[in-house]
Image (cartoon, helix red, strand yellow):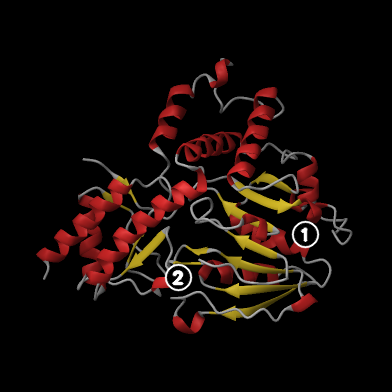
């Protein structure tokens, strides 16, 4: 039986990448050592680091005015690091509240001494079934505007970026490199890698270099929380997550073979359309999200009651469709169809759901 993993994260990785890891795990780059054993001070790692950074920037169409950091602590640590490092002129940060992870980011920013975190738009009243409307009235009163581009739990995503003159910051954890944006519109992007890029333990931060030399940048931050200090040491103030960076490099190479971000986004649209079209025609299953703002990555759906939800999950698991249980805060079901989920997996899931519905009319 073929297994399809629809987990929201840690999530499915490309099979060719896993096969390559398996093949060379005992001998990385003819060194006689495993990638798990090499020193982060070695030329082997230095070359890997440089190549990974170059591939990432090329896929994002970013130039030399951007830097990339490979950090630890997950996107959750970035909820604190972002305001610490860049809410330094006005000491005010604007947040658009589009769901659970936006709320978490707002809460953590509000704990940073001297920083005011303001909610400037929210879709809480609708149960986060849409992206909030945002008229840009911020002017020059905030250090940045923060958005969560894809809401993993609620299943919404930005299809159009906010029009703003305020520096734009994004938590892009769950649609990083899976959806096309003009990445040059962002001053800073961060993403936990365990959705679309690598195993858990790596966090990507892509930021404009001018943020590293801004005269308002605080001079007394702890080094491990300081973007400038981390950039000056090529993300190696302490031992970086070598294996995760290696895995990210392989996934980036795989992504290049898929036609880059544009190519994989086209495939993701095809996968999502197949699943959403079924849900919209179904009499048993329902997706609550406003169609124009549906996520390409995370598709939540419901049956009329929790008992039926549980029956679907049990039958799906037995059939090889794993991790379809919805997040505990919203219940129901959720299929996460990240870059590495093949079209065949979504096609077979839809066929399974159709059969289940036919048998439970």
Question: Residue 108's x, y, as percent?
Answer: 65, 67
Q: Position of residue 151 (x, y in %)?
A: 49, 65
* Quadrant location of the C terminus in the rendered image: bottom left
Name the one closer to the observer, 23 or 16: 16
Q: Looking at the rendered structure, which numbered label has been put on residue 293?
A: 2
Q: Along the horizontal axis of the image, is 43 left or right of 99? A: right
| Residue 315 visible in the displayed image | no
- 40 horizontally vs 318: left or right: right
- Residue at 40% from the left image edge and 33% from the top image edge: 16
Q: Is residue 1 above or below residue 65?
A: above
- Which of 74/335 is in front? 335
- Who's the residue at 29% across and 70% down the image? 302
Q: Residues within 10 Å of mark 2 (few under 14, many from 20)?
A: some
Q: Nearer the viewer, residue 150 or 219?
A: 150
Q: CA distance from mark 2 to mark 1?
A: 31 Å
Dot 2: what SS?
helix
- Looking at the rendered structure, the secondary structure element under dot 1 is helix
Which mark is nearer the camera, 2 or 1? Answer: 2
Q: Quadrant of residue 96?
A: bottom right
Furthest residue in direction bottom, as rendered: 125
Q: Which residue is mark 1?
A: 85
> Would residue 222 be found to the left or right of residue 128 on screen?
right
Q: Position of residue 45 (x, y in %)?
A: 65, 28
Disc 1 crowd rating (10 Å Cα; few below 14, some 14-19, many 20+) is many
Quadrant assignment for the N terminus: top left
Residue shown at 56%/15% (left/top)? 30
Q: Is residue 314 above or below residue 200?
A: below
Query: Which of the two discs, 2 and 1, labels the residue nearer the N terminus?
Result: 1
């Amino acid at each position: 039986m073929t297994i399809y993993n629809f987990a929201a994260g840690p999530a499915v990785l490309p099979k060719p990448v896993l096969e390559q890891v398996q093949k060379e795990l005992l001998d990385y780059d003819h060194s006689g050592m495993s990638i798990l054993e090499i020193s982060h001070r070695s030329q082997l790692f230095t070359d890997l680091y440089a190549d990974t950074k170059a591939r990432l920037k090329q896929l994002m169409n970013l130039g030399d005015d951007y830097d990339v950091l490979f950090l630890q602590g997950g996107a959750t640590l970035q909820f604190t690091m972002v305001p610490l490092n860049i809410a330094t002129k006005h000491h005010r940060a604007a947040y658009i509240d589009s769901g659970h992870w936006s709320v978490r980011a707002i809460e953590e920013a509000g704990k940073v001494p001297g920083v005011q975190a303001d909610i400037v738009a929210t879709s809480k009243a609708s149960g986060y079934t849409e992206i909030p409307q945002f008229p840009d009235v911020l002017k020059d009163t905030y250090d940045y505007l923060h958005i969560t581009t894809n809401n993993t739990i609620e299943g919404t995503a930005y299809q159009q970026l906010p029009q703003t003159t305020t520096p734009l910051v994004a938590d892009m954890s769950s649609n990083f490199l899976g959806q096309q944006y003009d990445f040059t519109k962002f001053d800073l992007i961060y993403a936990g890698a365990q959705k679309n890029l690598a195993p858990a333990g790596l966090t990507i931060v892509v930021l404009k270099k001018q943020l590293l030399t801004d005269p308002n940048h605080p001079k007394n931050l702890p080094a491990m929380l300081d973007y400038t200090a981390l950039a000056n040491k090529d993300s190696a103030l302490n031992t970086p997550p070598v294996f995760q960076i290696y895995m990210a490099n392989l996934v980036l190479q795989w992504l290049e073979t898929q036609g880059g971000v544009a190519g994989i986004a086209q495939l993701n649209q095809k996968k999502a359309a197949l699943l959403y079209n079924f849900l919209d025609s179904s009499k048993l299953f329902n997706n609550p999200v406003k169609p124009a703002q549906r996520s390409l990555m995370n598709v939540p759906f419901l049956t009329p009651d929790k008992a039926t939800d549980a029956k679907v999950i049990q039958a799906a698991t037995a059939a090889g469709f794993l991790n379809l249980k919805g997040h505990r805060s919203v219940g129901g079901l959720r299929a996460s169809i990240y870059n590495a989920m093949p079209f065949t997996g979504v096609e077979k899931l839809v066929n399974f759901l159709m059969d289940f519905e036919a048998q439970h009319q």
